[in-house]
Image (tube, rainbow, N blue to C red):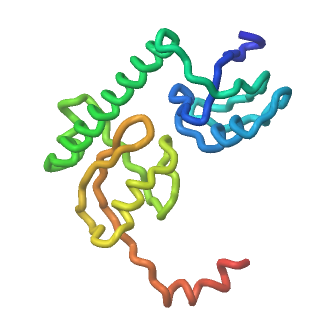
Amino acid sequence: TKAGLKIEERLVSGGDEAADLGPSPEFTSAVLSMQPGQVSPPLGVASGLAIVACTEIVPPAVRPLSEMTSQVSKDVLSERRRQAAYLAARRIAASATLAEGAKPMKLDVKKSGDLGAAADLPGVGPVPELDAALFGPGSTIGTKGSVAAPGGAIAYEITRHDAFDTSKFEAEKAGLRD
């Protein structure tokens, strides 16, 4: 730790999710495009900001199993957690209400507020599977379900669905441009 900042050194590759930092396409694309000696501007990650310095680019290679055992174990445990989260989200969505389904698991139901298509889910980021469920054909008020999401899964219920009103948009279009 320097000046209250946490300093870490790690190897990052295209397949890394940087799970401890949370999902961040900005972080991943910036890190993978860096050259040795470059320092990134502050990059948004779920836990705050990260500044990355590229010290070297290591050519891809097949590592011996003895070096990969720990990573393989982490990957297996991560996949099991994802599966457990998805099953839990399915159980929650199958309950009479999301709150009733979440209660035995000691989980809280959070309301996202209004979402638009392709909008980031607060605290999670983009979830294309949720977009497809919420804004796809046949989505109606009262529809419940579950989808996989970065770091776990989401149980959802559609509580409001505003259809796009072309005539209202046309009437307000001029004011939107100002």
Quarter of the image where the N terminus is located: top right
**Front residue (pair 63, 78):** 63
Q: Residue furthest right?
A: 37
Question: Which image quadrant for residue 108?
Answer: top left
> Image check: 140 left or right of 18?
left
> Image check: 34 left or right of 101?
right
Question: Which image quadrant for residue 105?
Answer: top left
> Image check: 91 left or right of 139?
left
Question: Which image quadrant for residue 83?
Answer: top left
| Above/below status of 161 relative to 88 | below
| Above/below status of 28 relative to 74 | below
> Image check: 11 left or right of 122?
right
Give x and y (percent) for residue 160: 34, 65
Give x and y (percent) for residue 74: 42, 20
| Above/below status of 163 relative to 116 | below
Quarter of the image where the C terminus is located: bottom right
Residue sitting at x 65%, y 43%: 26
Give x and y (percent) for residue 116: 48, 63
Residue sitting at x 47%, y 64%: 117
Give x and y (percent) for residue 90: 22, 44
**Front residue (pair 109, 120):** 120
Residue sitting at x 44%, y 79%: 164
**Front residue (pair 62, 18):** 62
| Above/below status of 160 relative to 77 | below
Residue sitting at x 15%, y 46%: 95
